[in-house]
Amino acid sequence: MKNFCIKFLTLIITVIISSLSVFADTDDIYKFCFVEDTKTKKEFARTIVPDDFIVSTSVKWERDYENPVSLTILAQSKDKTTSFLYSSAKTYVDSYADVQNVSSPIDTVFLTEKRAFAFPQEFVKELISANNPNAQEVVLVSSFESPEPIKDYLMSEMLKKMDDLKTEAKSDRRFSKVSIGNPYFQPFASTYSYTLNNQTYKQTVIAMISSFDYEFTKKTSVGKFEKFPMKLWFVSDLYVLKAKETDYDKYYEKFIIFVANTMINRKAENSLRLVKQQMKMELSPTYVDVHTGSNLKNLPSDLFNRYYEGGLPLYQEDKDMPMQKPSLQQVRWFTNVIYPQNRYKFVKLPTLWNQPVYVPQKYQCVYFDKVNNRFALGTTMKEHGKGWVHLILSNIIN
């Protein structure tokens, strides 16, 4: 009996060691995390973070006609000295003289938040100051911007967007004339250092700021017209890494993986487009909801529940909009410029059906734990235990 127990214990230890051998000699273990809304009971997004990080998420609904919902993901190391932050895209209106009118924080034309326009470096400094009021000696360490060919492509996308808005503006009877011009955009990865509580920190922000001038002419009295200039500007999905200077290099690559793999549930994305359309329709004085027979405005979250398709979340990439393709809608693609990524895509694993996962190209071996939804990244092949699957590299889109 004693010999049997010893052999049984040895077998258990062997199985455990075998199952752990896939990530032996490495700390590159990651896990899936999801953003779920307690109000609508829907899943909005997913991301990948280091296995030992603590993650908190938030979904906030607002009657903002450009941004009816805002998402945040905060992933922190156990000692909370290192953090990864994701914040969903935001639209602002700079109505110049009126932007400082605190009694009216919402612009009356676009029904979205008013805020003075800021160029990237100014915006990042404001962000650091807002989140770290006691930060001192804020200094720009480095800044990475897009190559010129990508900027040329994004400019063509911006001009298309402006043309679409011009077409839409022609149907707005409030104005006799609308002029849209002066396009601007800048994807960026800026890193700053600063001191806080006698510690030196480094903070990297990856985002894209874009804007264009929007001027409309409005009839103010009989035979009199007045021009109202403003700037419509956008902050794409925002990603922030904060770490002690001594730990920064250790976490930078992990942060890039977090950025490249933060994806919005496409069903939720499509539903939000319909929510925004419906909210604008409800501005009509003759509006009546065909579903309820009421002329009262619906809550954005109720509209979202109405339009959401149901079923499992969808994280397949749009065939015309993979992560590596530059776009104005999101800035994940920028990680492929900063730190080239390999793409893995799976069709036979139910938990990863057609979902892409991106990892830096130096990792030639990626394993997935089907039981615990974890990844192990390695540079060489290793033995792996039960439940772990070796993933095959998908086609790379350049």
Image: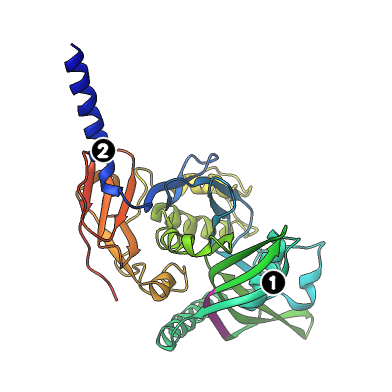
Q: Secondary structure at mark 1?
A: strand
Is there CB contact under 8 Å for labels 2 and 1? no
Q: On the image, numbered disc 2 is attached to which residue?
A: 17
Q: Give the residue at x 30% y 48%.
A: 24
**Residue 202, visible in the rendered structure:** yes
Using the image, determine if residue 87 lies above or below residue 154: above
**Residue 138 numbered tag:** 1
- Distance, label 2 to label 1, CA atoms, is 47 Å
The C terminus appears in which quarter of the rendering?
A: bottom left
Q: Nearer the viewer, residue 15 or 155?
A: 15
Q: Amino acid at mark 1?
A: Val
Q: Secondary structure at mark 2?
A: helix
Q: Nearer the viewer, residue 50 or 107?
A: 50
Q: Quadrant of residue 1?
A: top left
Residue 188 shown in magenta: yes
Q: Residues within 10 Å of mark 1 (few under 14, many from 20)?
A: some
> What residue range appears in magenta?
183-189
